[in-house]
Amino acid sequence: MEALKNRYRREAVEVHCPKHKITRVIYLPEEEMPVCPVCKKKMIIKEVLTEGKY
Ligand SMILES: [Zn+2]
C-alpha cells in the first residue's frame, strides 16, 4: 500500500562525529546510520529534529 507508506512518519535525526565535527541529517528508519568519512566509525545521534511535514 503506497499511500500508507507515504504517510509513515519519518524522524529527521542529526548525527555527528564529535571528533571531526562532521554533521549530517538522516531520516529514520529508512536510512542507515552513516559512518564518518574520516575515521570510518558510526556517527552518533546528536539531536532528533522530527519533521512531521513528510
Ligand atoms: Zn570521525
Image (cartoon, rainbow, N blue to C red):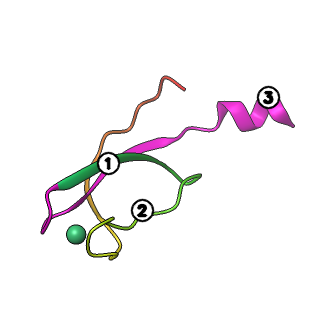
At mark 3, the secondary structure is helix
Q: Mark 3 vs mark 2: give the one in front.
A: 2
Q: Which residues are magenta?
A: 1-21
Q: Is residue 43 above or below residue 6?
A: below
- Amino acid marked by disc 1: Arg
- Amino acid marked by disc 2: Pro
Q: Is residue 37 left or right of residue 30?
A: left
- Residue 2: x and y in percent read 82, 33
| Quarter of the view holding residue 25 | top left
Q: Which residue is mark 3?
A: 3
Q: Residues within 10 Å of mark 1 (few under 14, many from 20)?
A: some
Q: Is residue 21 left or right of residue 15?
A: left
Mark 2 vs 1: CB contact within 8 A: yes
| Magenta run includes residue 30 | no
Residue drawn at x 55%, y 54% as measured from the top left? 29
- Amino acid marked by disc 3: Ala
| Magenta run includes residue 11 | yes
Q: Mark 1 vs mark 3: give the one in front.
A: 1
Query: 15 or 8: nearer the eye?
Result: 15
Instruction: Name the quarter where the C terminus is drawn.
Output: top right
For marks 1 and 3, the one nearer the N-term is: 3
Cβ at disc 2 under 8 Å from ligand 1: no
Image disc number at residue 24: 1
Q: Is residue 23 left or right of residue 25?
A: left
Q: Is residue 48 above or below residue 45?
A: above
Instruction: Name the quarter where the N terminus is drawn.
Output: top right
Q: CA distance from mark 3 to mark 2?
A: 28 Å
Residue drawn at x 42%, y 62% as measured from the top left? 34
Q: Which residue is mark 2?
A: 34
Query: 34 or 53: nearer the eye?
Result: 34
